Amino acid sequence: METIVTQIIENWKTLSPQEFDEYMLNQQRTLIREEMEQIIDAWESGKNTNNENCEDFDNGKQYFFEYYKR
């Protein structure tokens, strides 16, 4: 699975500076939403493996909003 950071870096490498700026401005909400989904999914995966760092939260969304709220 490609992460949001990987997508941004690939676009940074391949687009002109102006195209990259436009991409970032036009995709900002989508990128933030996808980042949130990836963080929540990672938390859920950790919870399923009994990761002790997941014990303080009821679900991945609660974890996200505690640490990554924008």
Image (cartoon, rainbow, N blue to C red):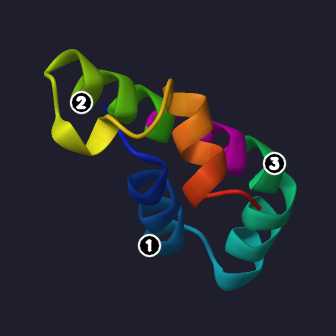
Given this view, does label 2 or label 3 mark the residue nearer the observer? Answer: 2
x then y, percent, for residue 59: 50, 24
Spatial CA distance of label 2 from label 1 is 32 Å
The crowding category of the residue bearing disc 3, from other C-alpha atoms within 10 Å (few below 14, some 14 to 19, many at least 20), is: few
| Placement of the C terminus among the 4 image quadrants | bottom right
User: Which residue corresponds to mark 2?
Assistant: 46
Identify the disc placed on residue 13: 1
Given this view, does label 2 or label 1 mark the residue nearer the observer? Answer: 2
Q: Are marks 1 and 3 in contact (CB under 8 Å)?
A: no
Q: Earlier in the sequence, mark 2 or mark 3?
A: 3
- Foreground residue, 7 or 16? 7
x then y, percent, for residue 43: 37, 33
Identify the disc placed on residue 29: 3
Q: Earlier in the sequence, mark 1 or mark 3?
A: 1
Location of residue 1 with respect to 7 vertically, above or below: above
The three-letter code of the residue at mark 2 reads Gly
Residue name at image x 69 percent, y 50 percent: 32
Q: Are marks 2 and 3 in contact (CB under 8 Å)?
A: no
The three-letter code of the residue at mark 1 reads Lys
Given this view, does label 1 or label 3 mark the residue nearer the observer? Answer: 3
Location of residue 42 with respect to 23 vertically, above or below: above
Q: 43 left or right of 30?
A: left
Q: 45 left or right of 2?
A: left
Indicate yes or no whether the magenta region holds residue 42.
no
